[in-house]
Amino acid sequence: MTADMIHSKRRKSGLIAAMMGALMMAAPLAAQDINLVEQHNSNALWFENWSGLSNANLTVREPSGQVLDFPSRKGSPVFKLEKSEGADGIYKYELRAATEEKARRVNKLYSGRDNEPESASVPYVLTGFFVVNRGVIVEKDTSTEDDDKK
């Protein structure tokens, strides 16, 4: 291995460690005050109680494995199920958004800019799933075996 290769690997591992550390520190702070509520009708999924969030991206993974992104600068991103393409099954999602809360950057990465900001928005991350049956979004089955025995 050359010195350049070793330096490159160290830089990449340092970048990954810095990003993971920032996410791990920031996520609990944002989750304390934001209580989004997943909403849906037969062909769309969105979130309510959206105050304090911006620059969101909703990533949805279809049962076929296809991944779709739904960005929104202001307000909740909305996933719309097209009847012709809506395969039955479990759809997994990840919602990422910026909060109004700022956190000091601990490990600033030099990007060649002289005016690196001292703080960044604390991220908010929410994951979940919804179910499509017969081409429509349906309620999740929250019953258990014990419910059937009553």
Image: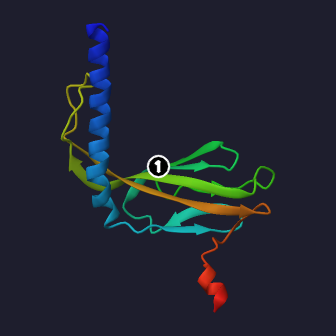
Residue located at (44% from left, 64% from top) = 50
Q: Nearer the viewer, residue 20 or 150?
A: 150
Q: Which residue is mark 1?
A: 73
11 above or below 117?
above
**Residue situated in front as seen by the camera: 127 or 35:** 127
Indicate the quadrant where residue 30 lies. Answer: bottom left
Q: Quadrant of residue 33?
A: bottom left
Residue in the picture at 29% in, 10% down: 4
Q: Report which quarter residue 120 is drawn in.
A: top left
Q: Amino acid at mark 1?
A: Arg
**Residue 127: x %, y % from top left:** 49, 57
Q: How is the image coloured?
A: rainbow
Residue 97 or residue 135, whichever sits in front: 135
The C terminus is located in which quarter? bottom right
* Viewport quadrant of the N terminus: top left
Give the class, few, some or many, for how many residues have Cα within 10 Å of label 1's Cα (few <14, many ≥20).
few
Residue lying furthest bottom: 150
Q: Is residue 27 left or right of residue 50?
A: left
Relative side of 134 to 54, left or right: right
Q: Where is residue 26 shown, x and y percent of the image?
A: 28, 52
Q: Nearer the viewer, residue 72 or 148?
A: 148
- The secondary element bearing badge 1 is classed as loop
In the rendered image, residue 148, in percent from the top left (x then y), is placed at: 66, 85
Vertical comparison of 91 with 107: above or below? below
Query: Image point 32% across, 55% down: which residue?
Result: 27
Question: Residue at (81%, 51%) from the top-left corner?
Answer: 84
- Give the total of numbered labels: 1
Instruction: Tell me if residue 67 comes above or below residue 98 in the rendering.
Output: above
| Residue 125 relative to residue 77: left or right | left
